Image (cartoon, rainbow, N blue to C red):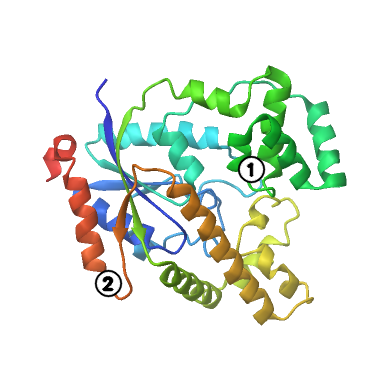
Amino acid sequence: MDKIFVAVVCGPTASGKTALAVDLALKFGGEIVSADSMQIYKGMDIASAKPTEEEKKGVPHHIMDFLEPTEAFSVADYVEMARKVIADIHARGKLPVICGGTGLYINSLIDNIEFDDTGSDPGFRAEMNALAAEKGNGHLLGMLAKVDPECAAQLHENNLKRIIRALEVYHISGKTMSEQKAASRLNPSPYEPCMMMIDHPREVLYERIDSRVDVMLEAGLIEEAREFFTHNDYVTASQAIGYKELRPYIDGVLPLEECVETLKRETRRYAKRQLTWFKKDSRIEHISAPKDVKYDKILKNAENLIKKYSFFIKDVL
């Protein structure tokens, strides 16, 4: 089977992924396939750092800004949609450029993960939710660690839905989620990926995060968050970083300055979790970006990485 060449620009929030992906798409005749679990939602423009039309520079962006915040969207849904989008981009002679910071989306797509078709047990889910309410999410994560330590190690205790699903899969099938994923990887990937990440020193990345939060606030983040909190059915979307940290200010409980500091701190923590995820993948090329590096150098290094795959993209080189 002929594999489809894809460029993948991944990494933590505020690292400069969007600008780099857009410029690579312009250089190599590509289109962007978003891999961001929050940019899929309509209305979450500022909180999710959705690129503006100016920032897109005319490059088509897919799997972005199409879903109502009330609607559910799983990793399996993402992979199914992304496969179709990539096939269409490739069929039109364009380069698919996957861009985003949701590592689970990217790895599930690139590694051709087949998702389990294990059924559900509503009674078991209700029991687990009640147990979490009584003893805390950490207790359920500990239960999962005993039967599926690999899966548990990849989950945060706040991700209760996925913790319960992993326990449910084991409860129903007797097989762990990790065992099912390992079996699914036996099918070869249809993609030949060139994966890259802009690698800023940690202190530089944190400065970029703090600056971007300030820009987001100036752009109207508080007003966007206030609007979302008027919708009680926006449960998942309203938990996005950028909204929940501002809730105490919107409710008149805490001063703005304190909430902004919390937002910056939580965004830095999120970036740290993203870095931990991506650094486990040895396929990812790290583009060094020391303090005061010129963007042109980052772009040139990224272009050179793609040019190594000239066999796949000879028509645009």
Q: Which residue is mark 1?
A: 71
Instruction: Answer few, some or many: residues within 10 Å of disc 1's Cα (few below 14, many 20 plus, some between 14 and 19).
Output: few
Q: Position of residue 64 (x, y in %)?
A: 47, 49
Which residue type does callout 1 highlight?
Glu
Q: Answer above or below: position of 42 versus 125.
A: below
Front-most of 264 and 176?
176
Give the residue displayed 43% in from the left and 20% down from the top: 186
Q: Please tell me in which quadrant of the rendered image residue 109 appears.
A: top left
Q: Position of residue 121 (x, y in %)?
A: 77, 24
Q: Answer above or below: position of 79 versus 247.
A: above
Q: Please tell me in which quadrant of the rendered image residue 223 appears.
A: bottom right
Give the residue displayed 51% in from the left and 74% down from the top: 210
CA separation in Å, label 1 and label 2:
41 Å
Give the residue displayed 25% in from the left and 71% down from the top: 294
Q: Secondary structure at mark 2?
A: loop
Q: Which residue is mark 2?
A: 293
Q: Position of residue 300 (x, y in %)?
A: 19, 59
Q: Secondary structure at mark 1?
A: loop
Q: Is residue 58 visible?
A: no
